[in-house]
Amino acid sequence: MIVLFLFILIMIFWLLWIHCDFYEFKKNLTKKYEQLEKQINSLDSSKIGIDESAMYKEELSAEKPKETPLFEDDAAKHGNADEQSAKVQHTVNVFEKDEKSKRSIENIFFGSLFNKIGALALVIAIGIFITVVSQFIVFTPLMRIAAGFVAGLAFVFVSLNMHKKSDNMKPYAEVLLGVGLAVLFISTYCATGVFHLFSTYLGLGIGCVLLLSTYFLAGRYKSYSALGIGLFGGYLTPFFLNDNLSQNFLFCYLLFMNAIALVYVYVNSDKRWLNFVNLVLTTVLLFGTSIFAHDKFSIICPIILWVMYLSFDLLRILTNKIQHEKEHYMSSYINLGILAFLSWLVFSGERMLLGLVLFSYAFIYLAVVCYFLSRNQKKILRPYFYALIAVVYMGTFFVSAGMTRVLLWTFETLFITSLRYFLDLKYLTKWVLFFSLTCIVSILRLNTSIVPVEGYVPLLNSRLVLFGVPALVMFGCSSILAKCPKSRDSQVSLFLTFLYSTMIYLYVIFEFNAWMTHSSLVSNSVDDMFVTLKAMVNVCIGFIYALHLKFLADIKGSYIFRLLSYLMWSVSAVFLVLLGVRYVPVEEFLPILNLRFFAFAVGIACALVYSKMEKKYLFDYLAITLGFFLISYETADYLIKFGLYDSSGFIITIMWIFYLAALSLFGLAFNVKSLKNSAIYISILAIFKIIFYDIAGLASVYKVLVLLVLGAVLMLISYLYNKSQVEESRSDDE
């Protein structure tokens, strides 16, 4: 779990690095700095020119005599009068602005806001009246519907007359028009769905006429109020129904509303927002009614809605009516999102069928993409390519078999990478990253379900396919992206290299642990032994993985790999030091011939390789530190095995002295600074341990032995050092 947690942290760090794109940031910052420097230079040159011209004018003015007015008093009076008139004009302008602001506030509330709120209240009141008033007053259904139609038509005719007679009353007339249309919508739908006075076809026909009338009047009189309130009445109608209405009937009604809206928006391109409003309201209404409905709408209805809006976008593209790229993206994404959501409502309990339906949508998007590719319209192609990839991703997500899902995401990553390279579609690089990360998460999640049971064969099992195929595909994707010129492509290529390298080592770790669990050697008596074995082998793999990242850093020229290599070595070393405190079980312990010694040897060897490659003394000190811990652990466990640890703890100090002696001898012989310094540090530590810990609890014989060994070793080291200094001085004299 700790290895997986560390792996996830590394991926998050790398993703942030790729997303920030520091290379591009540095280039942009350099460009801005150069532009700013050019502007400053141009300003300095223009300032010099201005200063020279100003000096020239001053010289000319100094040569000319000053002209004085003949009537100084009259000029002064004339100037004062001009100043006073300017002040008066400024005061008048301020007063007019205050009056305009007051009038604008009054117009907002009294002229527009109040009548709209009142109109909405009337629409809601009339709807409630038609369905609830029968509890208090006996009205036949025909009387209630007739009253609704009469009230709605009256509002419409009054608003049209007011609109013709006075321009000042146009806002009020527009609101009345919207109220009338909304009342007619409610009356028609209630007559069909609640009271069953109209047949389904008659109600649908009247609704069609009302929708056409709404859009016609809104377009003719340029009335947002009529359009908005009319649609509000149309969408609000189902909430006043008492009977359970068929979901297919409701969807057909909403399809017609969307169809008329599309025609209206196609004619009036400045009303593009109406498409988004209709899509959102349609989805909300269907989701709300589906919670309480006993039946489900057919999948044909969402497909028809999707095809309507997709055809609308394609028609606008072919007629060159697409003006805003962001609007095109938003329309495509919202349409796809609503299609996927409505499909989920239909097939919420049938996961596999939902995946097949989503894949069928992908074929239509693929046809659209191929069409625009044939016309070489890559700019228009982008939203549909995104939609195609998103549908494929969602369809893969609903595949029931976990292994099939991983393999599909893997080959989809390869497909997107190939499109990025061969079609030069730069925006697909992020999708490569997204699919590869999804694949990795699925692999780690599915790996936990592979349990070594009877019949388990090491290496030749499903884990090999689970890790091997994605690793090979990511290797190919990394090689392809490395050939692309953009810096983001090279960063994603490095990230994929990190992913497939990590997958190989994770596969080795998981497969070894599974083999150890399944092995017949594992039993209750030696369970601790195999726990130690698994831990030490995992640490050794961690050291080898860190060294592999270092080689990748040198090959790829990436300092991120170098940092990750240092991090992995450090984590492995820390775990090794923590795990090596006690060798479990101690009864099985053999000095040198044990797994702990092998793990420490691997860590020390990796540190020495780092030192040789990096030419830094730090790794020498790290290797010496691991050796120090190894000697301490080996000596302590040997004493514990024979029950001598409490009485013979000073032997650990003696081993330290021998260790510093060996470091000193090699350091003096080969003039290695890190060995000599380490020997000094260990000698100080040994002296402190002898004085403050060992001597206090030892018998006199052991005290003499420890001090003799310490004194002899230190004297020998001092003698050899002085002798080497004398030989160096002689060679210098010669």
Image (spheres, rainbow, N blue to C red):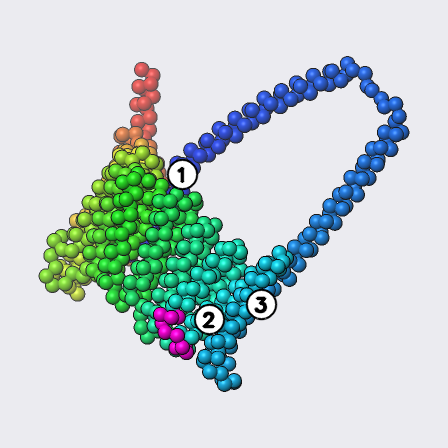
Q: Which residue is mark 2?
A: 186
Quick one: label 3 or label 1, which is nearer the N terminus? 1
Q: Which mark is residue 34?
A: none
Query: Residue 212: x, y in percent?
Result: 44, 61
Quick one: label 3 or label 2, which is nearer the N terminus? 3
Q: How many marks?
A: 3
Q: Which residues are magenta?
A: 194-203
- Residue appearing at x 85%, y 23% in the figure: 69
Whether residue 666 is visible here, answered yes or no, is yes
User: Residue 123 vs residue 490: left or right?
Assistant: right
Considering the numbered disc 2 on the image, is that residue within a helix, a strand or a loop? helix
Mark pair 3, 1: CA separation: 56 Å
Query: Residue 356: x, y in percent?
Result: 23, 59
Q: Which circle, 3 or 1, is nearer the viewer?
A: 3
Q: Which residue is mark 1?
A: 22
Q: Which residue is mark 3?
A: 118
Which residue type does callout 2 highlight? Ile
Query: Residue 400: x, y in percent?
Result: 22, 61
Query: Residue 432: x, y in percent?
Result: 29, 46
Q: Between 502 and 529, which is closer to the camera in this rendering?
A: 502
Which residue type does callout 3 highlight? Gly
Vertical arrangement, residue 365 with respect to residue 676, above or below: below
Q: Is residue 160 magenta?
A: no
Whether residue 623 is visible here, answered yes or no, is no
Quick one: label 2 or label 1, which is nearer the N terminus? 1
